[in-house]
């Protein structure tokens, strides 16, 4: 058993062994699950082994459970077992074991979480905005959700390659090239590059609709770019550089880092080979001048892999990308994070990748769009919400809150705090709901200090941290390590149980690509802590009990901080 094994792991192993012994089963027969209960009436963990084994042992589940309870010698961390309902075996952990466990976790950097990812590699393709266009709300969610998944996987020991698959190639660059030469406003380009590039594109596009010569001109310039013309290439590179520069400012504000910025263009040279491979396997056929893959058998519409004008498609690039990623990194899994509108695209190219024999475990994590009620933003240009203005607004609203709650705080610190709270509020709103559900964003909810929000948890963290500081001041010369954790009160027990389940929340959030599982865990933890704080004395408790409670406090603070960090949300000791 690993050093910081959870109770769930320990119980599973013990139950399987004990079942084998009591009923004389062979190794291969036993595969029994032990799960946490959500009602402490049924103990802390529950096992349904008796039901599972009923057929094989030809006995009623309740009888199996009873025989088991009578014969098994309990391990020292279990206080008692009870039989419930049709034959559930309920485990009640001993307070002593619980206290020891929480205390031992103080020395584990991963807080009991098993490093299941050691030696495994995942590529996470997220954010991936398009060059020369403002990020839309879909990219914001992809950035925030993708980054949380990135952090969760790293925490589990995986080697993660965060890859920003920029949309940096396509027919729009013909219009961009000619438009830039005609319409650019250098000043605007210097101050807000992406906005200016977008304006240029729109102007050029509009002109192409009225002016055939312009359209042909754009096409010719695109062909030149594709053929490697030096001047066009340099200009295209400039568009990319300017866009990345602006995206990076946003990533910096969000605390998001990528290992790779590999745009679609990186895979260009591989596209003809993908077509050849499809043709060689008889997977593609001509249709009205285009080359398509028929996916009727799979119940999907056809997928165009080469257009009638010879250009390649989004799916073709994605296939080439998978091939390249396998060659270079040999990942155990590739995770793509985009909005729901791309589900068909991913299903299609995953299927084709399979047919091409590409050995990769491909996962599409999709999320619903976030709804932004009309009045959400004071600055709203066109119908694209500029992420930067959303972040600005979050920070300025948070600054108002900080100024009124901590007027005496130095201004620099107020601003720093407002940044952490504002950004945290946006991220938490995004992460605290099931990704697949539709989220309606409102400032009231995002910044609600009383409800399930980022700021609520950040404040909770700061309050919990300050308990320790107060203790330090009041009892100088004492060390917490001089007194061990004791669990006597019911609420202490509840808190300890919750703390011991942090690893389960991490794995469930990662395995299900659902950061909301971590958010729920943290919110529950903060609430349990708050009733702990309200129900028992801390600094006024007797010596020993007092230190034990402060230690529980410290574990709670540390878990909250770690959990928020996994969501990409910063904490401050003082609020
Ligand atoms: N650039 C795409 C968009 O803005 C997202 C790319 C997602 N990743 C991928 N490998 N297809 O919609």
Image (cartoon, rainbow, N blue to C red):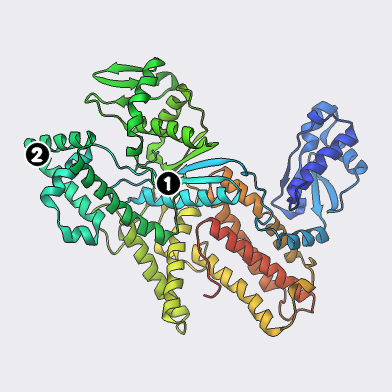
Residue 122 in sight from this viewpoint? yes
Q: Which numbered dot is residue 14?
A: none
Which quadrant would residue 188 be assigned to in this image? bottom left
Q: Position of residue 274 (x, y in %)?
A: 37, 25
2 vs 1, front mark = 1
Residue at mark 2: 214
Residue, x 63% and y 69% (percent of image)?
530
Residue, x 56% and y 43% (percent of image)?
512
Relative to 348, residue 385 above or below: below
> Marks 1 and 2: in contact by CB < 8 Å?
no
Residue 376 in sight from this viewpoint? no
Q: Position of residue 570 (x, y in %)?
A: 51, 64
Lower sequence index among marks 2 and 1: 2
Residue found at the very far right of the displayed protein: 71
Residue, x 76% and y 64% (percent of image)?
490
Q: Which SS class for mark 1?
A: loop
Q: Is residue 222 left or right of residue 296?
A: left
Residue at mark 1: 260
Ligand 1 rendered quadrant: top left
Q: How many marks?
A: 2
Residue in the foreground of this view, choosing between 429 and 413: 413
Q: Position of residue 156 (x, y in %)?
A: 61, 48
Relative to 294, residue 253 above or below: below
Q: Is residue 13 left or right of residue 430?
A: right
Residue, x 79% and y 28% (percent of image)?
28
Which quadrant would residue 58 be assigned to in this image? top right
Distance between the Cα atoms at labels 2 and 1? Answer: 36 Å
Q: Which SS class for mark 2?
A: helix
Residue in the foreground of this view, choosing between 573 and 367: 573
> Mark 2: few, some, or many residues within 10 Å (few <14, many ≥20)?
some
Instruction: Confirm or reject: label 1 Cβ below 8 Å from ligand 1.
Output: no
């Amino acid at each position: 058993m690993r050093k910081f094994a959870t109770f769930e792991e320990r119980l599973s192993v013990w139950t399987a062994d004990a079942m084998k012994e009591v009923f004389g089963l062979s190794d291969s027969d036993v595969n029994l699950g032990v799960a946490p209960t959500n009602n402490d009436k049924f103990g802390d963990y529950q096992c349904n082994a008796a039901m599972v084994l009923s057929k094989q042992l030809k006995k009623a589940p309740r009888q199996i459970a009873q025989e088991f309870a009578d014969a098994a010698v309990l391990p020292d961390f279990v206080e008692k077992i009870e039989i419930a309902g049709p034959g559930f075996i309920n485990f009640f952990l001993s307070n002593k074991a619980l206290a020891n466990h929480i205390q031992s976790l103080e020395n584990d950097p991963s807080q009991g979480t098993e490093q299941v990812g050691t030696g495994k590699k995942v590529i996470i393709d997220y954010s991936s905005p398009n060059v020369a266009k403002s990020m839309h709300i879909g990219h914001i969610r992809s950035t925030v959700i993708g980054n949380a998944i990135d952090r969760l996987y790293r925490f589990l020991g995986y080697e993660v390659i965060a890859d920003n698959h920029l949309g940096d190639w396509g027919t729009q660059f013909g219009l961009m090239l000619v438009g830039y030469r005609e319409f650019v406003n250098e000043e605007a380009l210097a101050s807000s590059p992406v906005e200016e590039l977008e304006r240029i594109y729109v102007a050029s596009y509009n002109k192409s609709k009225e002016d055939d010569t312009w359209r042909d001109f754009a096409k010719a310039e695109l062909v030149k770019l594709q053929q490697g013309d030096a001047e066009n290439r340099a200009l295209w590179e400039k568009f990319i550089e300017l866009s990345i520069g602006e995206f990076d400012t946003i990533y910096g504000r969000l605390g998001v880092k990528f290992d790779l910025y590999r745009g679609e263009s990186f895979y260009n040279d591989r596209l003809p080979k993908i077509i050849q491979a499809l043709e060689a396997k008889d997977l593609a056929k001509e249709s009205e001048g285009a080359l398509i893959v028929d996916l009727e058998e799979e119940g999907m519409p056809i997928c165009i892999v080469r257009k009638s004008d010879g250009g390649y498609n989004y799916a073709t690039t994605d296939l080439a990308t998978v091939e390249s990623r396998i060659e270079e990194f040999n990942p155990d899994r590739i995770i793509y994070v985009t909005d729901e509108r791309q589900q068909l695209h991913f299903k299609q190219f995953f299927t084709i990748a399979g047919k091409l024999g590409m050995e990769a475990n491909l996962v599409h994590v999709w999320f619903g769009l976030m709804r932004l009620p009309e009045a959400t933003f004071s600055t709203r240009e066109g119908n694209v919400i500029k992420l930067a203005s959303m972040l600005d607004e979050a920070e300025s609203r948070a600054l108002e809150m900080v100024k009124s709650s901590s007027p005496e705080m130095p201004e620099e610190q107020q601003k720093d705090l407002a940044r952490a709270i504002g950004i945290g509020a946006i991220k938490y709103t995004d992460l605290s709901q099931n990704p697949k559900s539709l989220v309606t964003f409102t400032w009231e909810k995002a910044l609600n200090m009383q409800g399930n929000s980022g700021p609520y948890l950040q404040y909770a963290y700061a309050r919990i941290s300050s308990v320790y500081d107060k203790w330090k001041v009041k009892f100088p010369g004492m060390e917490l390590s001089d007194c061990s954790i004791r669990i006597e009160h019911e609420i202490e027990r509840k808190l300890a149980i919750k703390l011991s389940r942090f690893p389960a929340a991490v794995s469930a959030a990662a395995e299900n690509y659902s950061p909301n599982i971590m958010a729920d865990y943290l919110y529950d933890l903060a609430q349990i802590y708050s009733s702990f704080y309200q129900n028992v004395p801390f600094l006024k408790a007797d010596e020993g009990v007092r230190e034990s409670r402060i230690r529980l406090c410290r574990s709670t603070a540390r878990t909250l901080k770690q959990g928020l960090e996994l969501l990409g949300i910063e904490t401050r000791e003082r609020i």
